[in-house]
Amino acid sequence: MNKKSLFSMLPSVDEVLGASKIIDISKEYPRSLILESIREAIDLKRKEIVRLKEEEVNKFNLNNEEIVESALNRLRINYSLSLKKVINATGTVVHTNLGRSLLSETFKDDLWEAASRYSNLEYNLEKGERGSRYDHLTNTIKRLTKAEDVLVVNNNAAAVLLVLSTLAKDKEAIVSRGELVEVGGSFRIPSIMELSGAKLVEVGATNKTHLKDYEYAINEDTSVLMKVHTSNYRILGFTESVEIDKLSEIGKKYNIPVIEDLGSGVFIDLSKYGLSYEPTVLDSINKGADIVTFSGDKMLGGPQAGIIVGKKEYIDKMKKNQLTRALRVDKLTICALEATLRMYLDEERAIKEIPTLRMLTYKIEELEEKAKKLLNMIDQLKLDAEVCIEDGLSQVGGGSMPLETIKTKVISIMPKIMNVSALEKKLRLGEANIIARVYDNKYVLDVRTIFDDEYEIIVNELDKAFK
Ligand SMILES: *Cc1c(COP(=O)(O)O)cnc(C)c1O
């Protein structure tokens, strides 16, 4: 036996296609994908033969059954969706890499109906004529923020771009040096300003900006005064910035619109629930901001969106900007956003039923109870590891409040028979795709972001990983 004769013994694509196991599934998958997967499986075997050492050639067992199994395996991988559920055991609630905010189950039927049936998306039922997709959000936003009007675009980066492009293109936009930050990953305030065509006028110093700095910079080319809420970065110590109420006074004095990029859209004062205070949208409007922008999927807990609220005269101009068409949101976003916003009309309900808020406001006793339940289930596996409950810190996360940590309870697992990073890898690549943290040589599961119905899955996966 030599390699050449091994190659000639490889089955043809047609032979594998004729295997009974392949025939059984042939109706479930597209034919092109079946053929591709069979070719891949045969090719993998061919590469295995290429790599054989001379003395291994005789012992090599060329098994068609194995190629059929490998083709079926390839087929399942090739056909599965790339975007799939993972278990977030990191404790970071607004986790940008893991999908940011989760939508509330309470409106899942509405969402499916909006997706699968015709709707009045851009149709005014009363008048029997064309309507605006943005009107669906106006009433709820008005109730929540007292703002005159609202416009929603793809995300907050798009919102800032649209606002500046409409109000400040080819004119000057004044912003504090201390607020020219990079937020939410790759969104840079100075770059987005440049992209909008606005001329950026920086005032103040990195650590201190005074009201008079803004006032001195105003001239006949000034179009907006902008404030950016830099929630993901703080200069500590000798600092000063101008609050939105003072900036708004200047804006009124010179008749220049004041815009505030709040970043994370908060509607409830979360300091009542033990988190640090974040300015709410209502605060900004009350304090005189003409336009406020924020994300739909940070602390707000809704779908990805950029929400612009404020004076009708400015929002009307934005609606006429061609960019609005390019940045527009689809009906699923509008449905999910309206349903999420409506929940805020009852604060207690919002805290309970919007997953982001629920997870951020767990009491430590609730977390302890969750941890005990999960620990109990893990203990029954009798893993070759030290397993216990420990105090930990969760993060609010994302571009929301990365500096903010909240006390939590974690399950810490110190394996005795394998290295902790090998355990992490097994669970991450396993069927349930569990994403957890590793520190101090321990595998750490933060119960804050784990759903109750995921406990059993985690236990099963741990069982498999230790075998
Ligand atoms: C997160 C953030 C953005 C970007 O929002 P996206 O919705 O991620 O586009 C812009 N500005 C501020 C202040 C932010 O915190």
Image (cartoon, helix red, strand yellow):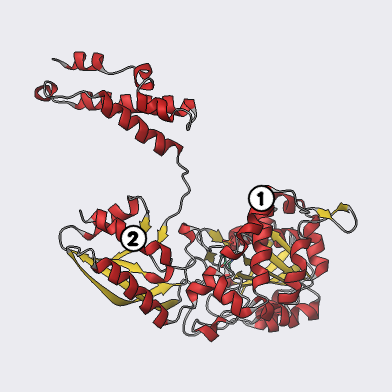
- What residue is shown at x 23% (from left), y 24% (from top)? 63
Residue that lies at the very extreme toward the left in this rendered image: 55
Using the image, determine if residue 172 lies above or below residue 33. below
The numbered disc on residue 458 is 2
Amino acid type at circle 1 is Ala
The x and y percentages for residue 62 are: 21, 23
Q: Can residue 433 be seen?
A: yes
Around disc 1, counting alpha carbons within 10 Å, would you say few (fewer than 14), some (14 to 19), or many (20 or more)? some
Sooner in the amino-acid sequence: mark 1 or mark 2: 1
The numbered disc on residue 388 is none
Q: Can residue 279 be seen?
A: no
Residue sitting nearer the eye, 244 or 197: 244
The x and y percentages for residue 419 are: 19, 58
The part of the image, by quadrant, that contains residue 202 is bottom right
The x and y percentages for residue 358 are: 51, 74
- Mark count: 2
Image region (quadrant) for ligand 1: bottom right
Q: Please indicate whether residue 415 sits to the left or right of residue 393 in the image.
A: left
Residue sitting nearer the eye, 296 or 378: 378
Around disc 2, counting alpha carbons within 10 Å, would you say few (fewer than 14), some (14 to 19), or many (20 or more)? many
Q: Please indicate whether residue 437 sits to the left or right of residue 302 in the image.
A: left
- The residue beneath circle 1 is 115
Q: Decide if ligand 1 comes within 8 Å of the CB at mark 2.
A: no
- What residue is shown at x 46% (from left), y 78% (from top)? 362
CA distance separating discs 1 and 2: 32 Å
The x and y percentages for residue 274 are: 49, 84
- SS class of the residue under badge 1? helix
Amino acid type at circle 2 is Ile
Q: Decide if ligand 1 comes within 8 Å of the CB at mark 1.
A: no
